[in-house]
Amino acid sequence: MSTSDPTASPTTFDLERRVDSADTTLHNPRYAVIALGSNLGNRLETLQGAVDALADTPGLRIKAVSAVYETEALGGPEEQPNYYNAVVVLRTTLPPHSLLERGNAVEDAFGRVRTVRWGPRTLDVDILAYEGVTSEDPELLLPHPRSHERAFVLAPWLDADPKAELPGLGLVADLLDDLGGEDAQGVRRRDDINLRLPE
């Protein structure tokens, strides 16, 4: 069945050819946190596909996946569809820039197009934090410079890891409370839908 509804159209992806040669064992893994967002296409299918694609990445093991949260788009063009957001907590032997490359490859596999700043997108993959690493590299700022200001990031992060801490800024729970709690900034937890943790 065809539809013009941008939130209901199917999404296809092919990540198999993008898998790199990262170490398949997890010796001395690091804790990392990735935020996922989608407001075009079949948003839930896209987020689940991103989780599955990350889980298939050598040198990476997903430890927790948050609930799905819905929010209106912040900034960018007006009248965008609402976002579905989630957070993935993982352990990885990939160095930060390799993890960034993997995230970009997953975005590309879902048809991400970067034409309008803060514009609508099929998939957004952002590294929020990487254990023991701070970076001022414009290509990879760590920890993510605006994550402490965004309830749509903090709420799912807290859900996935109740003891989470944002390096240099404190506990995620406290940062979210400072914004007004889980429902701050129009964020709404979607208990009627969920993402599966890969087996």
Image (cartoon, rainbow, N blue to C red):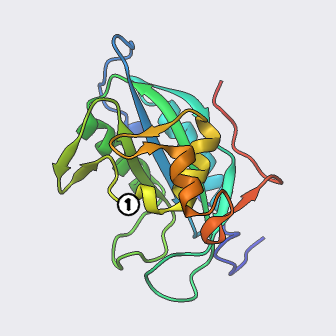
Quarter of the figure with residue 18: top left
Residue picked out by circle 1: 146
Find residue 185 and report its horizontal and vertical position in percent.
60, 70
Q: Image check: 128 left or right of 176?
A: left
Residue 172 or residue 35, whichever sits in front: 172
The residue positioned 35% from the left and 10% from the top of the image is 27
Find residue 83 and report its horizontal and vertical position in percent.
60, 67
For this orientation, the residue located farthest to the right is 192
The residue positioned 43% from the left and 48% from the top of the image is 106
Quarter of the figure with residue 129: top left
Mark count: 1
Kind of residue indicated by mark 1:
Arg
Find residue 6 and report its horizontal and vertical position in percent.
64, 76
**Placement of 113 over or under 189, stated as above or below:** below
The residue positioned 51% from the left and 65% from the top of the image is 122
For this orientation, the residue located farthest to the left is 137
For this orientation, the residue located farthest to the bottom is 78
Q: Image check: 134 left or right of 42?
A: left
Q: Image check: 138 left or right of 60?
A: left
Find residue 38 and report its horizontal and vertical position in percent.
55, 63
Residue 150 or residue 95, whichever sits in front: 150
The quarter in which the C terminus is drawn is: top right
Residue 179 or residue 124, whichever sits in front: 179
The residue positioned 83% from the left and 54% from the top of the image is 192
Q: Circle 1 — which element?
A: loop
